[in-house]
Image (tube, helix red, strand yellow):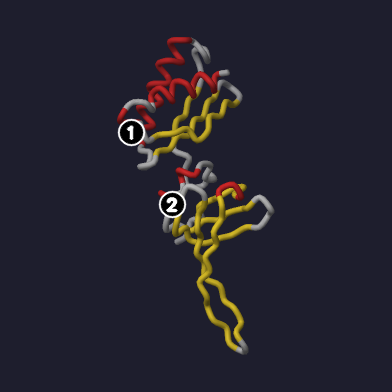
Amino acid sequence: MISAQLTQLLEAKFQEEEFADCFIIEIKTLQNKRVEIYVDSDSGITFKKCQILSRHLEAEIDEKGWLGEKYTLEVSSPGITRPLKFARQYPRNIGRKLEVKQLEGETKTGTLIEVDEKQITLESKQRIKEGKKKKTVVIQDIIPFDNIKETKVKITF
């Protein structure tokens, strides 16, 4: 119930120009009156935006008494370790290495080079044997969004 109310509050806030490119990734209500909210934006979520959203929600929660007097509210970006959930998160990750688990079980890893409304394109290098020699070839995998089970950004150093 609280998730639906918080979603409504955030969606209303996202109508403001400053937050127009923001969207909800996930709202988790945990034990001990703890609420974690993950938001993102097409231009990248900032600490300042999270802070403003948190204060906006706290004011409403306190006024309406939804969680009582003691609760914990966290509003943050999903972070690099959380899977990508929406197609609109992919364009900001062009040039990054991704691991994509597909619905039929196959996993592809490569650099995200292209995103459109229906699919993504990953590019990877593979060593293949050609006669007695090995050579490196560049492979592009096109993966439709409706075939993606989970995508994670792989951190490389």
| Mark pair 2, 1: CA separation | 22 Å
Numbered badge on residue 66: none
Give the residue furthest to the right. Answer: 104
Q: Position of residue 12 (x, y in %)?
A: 40, 22
Q: Position of residue 148 (x, y in %)?
A: 59, 49
Q: Secondary structure at mark 1?
A: helix
Amino acid type at image mark 1: Lys
Q: Secondary structure at mark 2?
A: helix
Give the residue furthest to the front. Answer: 118
Q: Which residue is mark 2?
A: 93
Q: Which residue is mark 1?
A: 48
Q: Position of residue 36 (x, y in %)?
A: 51, 30
Q: Does residue 135 sit above or below 37 in this rendering?
A: below
Q: Is residue 1 left or right of residue 48?
A: right
Q: Does residue 102 sit above or below 43 in this rendering?
A: below
Amino acid type at image mark 2: Asn
Instruction: Look at 46% across and 15% down and name the residue there.
Output: 61
Q: Does residue 5 sit above or below 136 in this rendering?
A: above
The label nearer to you, 2 versus 1, is 2
Q: Quadrant of residue 135?
A: bottom right
Label 1 Cα neighbours within 10 Å, binned few <14 / some 14-19 / many ≥20: few
Say which of 77 and 94 sits in front: 94
Label 2 Cα neighbours within 10 Å, binned few <14 / some 14-19 / many ≥20: some
Mark 2 and mark 1 lie on one chain; the one further toward the N terminus is: 1
Image quadrant in which the N terminus is located:
top right
Instruction: Look at 50% across and 64% down and name the residue there.
Output: 123
Say which of 153 and 33 sits in front: 153
Instruction: Look at 62% across and 89% down and name the residue there.
Output: 132
Give the residue furthest to the top. Answer: 64
Q: Quadrant of residue 49?
A: top left
